[in-house]
Image (cartoon, rainbow, N blue to C red):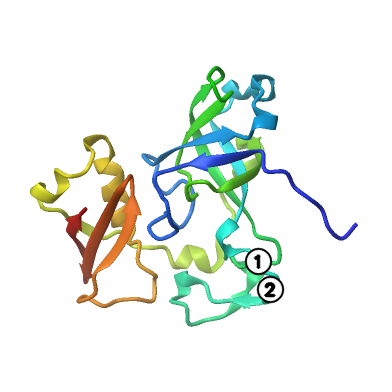
């Protein structure tokens, strides 16, 4: 068979209604919490039996916003400034022959009872709200962790954190329990890596608010929270 059909088993509920602002990889922001909510066919607590013994999960999901009929053998990784082409299979680009992604997340809570069946609260997810999930698998430290693995170009092009400045009057408009997470998102520089205009105002939606900011050098200043 050359083609297979996958069922959507669950969807993520997160504070990101759009792609802009989402961490570039899973696990970078451990305070960022999301919830895996299962589709009706899979709302069965027995399917999670034994999962309580694991600390982390692999989530296999669909790049639902980037589904295309065609594909390119090379892509421009943002980490390299968008100026150099590399093979699609040497990157984690969302533009792939099959729009499949994977994320490693920490299990914060497993709720087996509820009106809509079981759900899993996780931290460190890099998924947009409503993203379809096609499978989850437990993370196995003895097999999945390889301390001496080589990270290729991604290892030498890690993102530097920015200094974040937010006026107290502006920050007061944001939910207190999510302020540390917001600061973490901003510190990782949500801008496309190839953009560096100190006069430009950027914005993204998070936790029901619109965050607007500017970046000059290594300092990010929040302009407004609406």
The numbered disc on residue 111 is none
Query: What residue does disc 1 label?
Result: 96
The numbered disc on residue 71 is 2
> Which sits in the foreground, 153 or 96?
96
**Left or right of 8 on screen, residue 112:** left
Q: CA distance from mark 2 to mark 1?
A: 6 Å
Determine which quarter of the picture holds residue 97: bottom right
Q: The residue tagged with tag 1: helix, strand or loop?
A: loop
Q: Are marks 2 and 1 in contact (CB under 8 Å)?
A: yes
The residue at the point 60 percent across, 41 percent down is: 58
In the rendered view, would you say 28 is above or below 218?
above
**Mark 1: few/some/many CA within 10 Å (<14, 14-19, 20+):** many
In the rendered view, would you say 198 is above or below 39?
below
Q: Earlier in the sequence, mark 2 or mark 1?
A: 2
The location of residue 74, given as percent across then percent down, is 63, 77
**Mark 2: few/some/many CA within 10 Å (<14, 14-19, 20+):** few
Count numbered badges in the picture.
2
In the rendered view, would you say 215 is above or below 127?
below
Q: The residue tagged with tag 2: helix, strand or loop?
A: loop
- Image quarter (top left, top right, bottom left or bottom right) of the N terminus: bottom right
Determine which quarter of the picture holds residue 142: top right
Say whether residue 218 is visible: no
> Which sits in the foreground, 46 or 52?
46
The residue at the point 64 percent across, 24 percent down is: 48
The location of residue 52, given as percent across then percent down, is 57, 21
Say whether residue 4 is visible: yes
């Amino acid at each position: 068979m050359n083609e297979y059909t996958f069922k959507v088993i669950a969807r993520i509920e997160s504070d990101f209604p759009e792609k802009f602002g989402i961490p570039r990889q899973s696990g970078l922001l451990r305070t960022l919490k999301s919830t895996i909510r299962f589709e009706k066919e899979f709302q069965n607590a027995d399917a999670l039996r034994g999962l309580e013994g694991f600390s982390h999960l692999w989530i296999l999901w669909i790049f639902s916003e980037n589904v295309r009929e065609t594909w390119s053998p090379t892509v421009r990784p943002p980490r390299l400034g968008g100026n150099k082409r590399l093979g699609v299979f040497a990157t984690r680009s969302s533009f792939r022959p099959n729009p499949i992604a994977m994320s490693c997340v920490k299990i914060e809570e497993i709720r087996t009872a509820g009106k809509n069946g079981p759900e899993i609260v996780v931290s460190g997810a890099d998924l947009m709200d409503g993203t379809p999930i096609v499978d989850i698998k437990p993370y196995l430290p003895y097999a999945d962790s390889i301390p001496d693995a080589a990270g290729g170009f991604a290892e030498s092009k890690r993102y530097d954190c920015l200094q974040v400045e937010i006026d107290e009057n502006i920050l007061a408009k944001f939910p207190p329990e999510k302020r540390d997470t917001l600061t973490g998102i901003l510190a990782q520089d949500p801008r496309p890596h190839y953009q560096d205009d100190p006069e430009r105002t950027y914005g993204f939606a998070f936790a029901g608010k619109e965050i607007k900011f500017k970046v000059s050098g290594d300092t990010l200043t929040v302009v407004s929270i609406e």
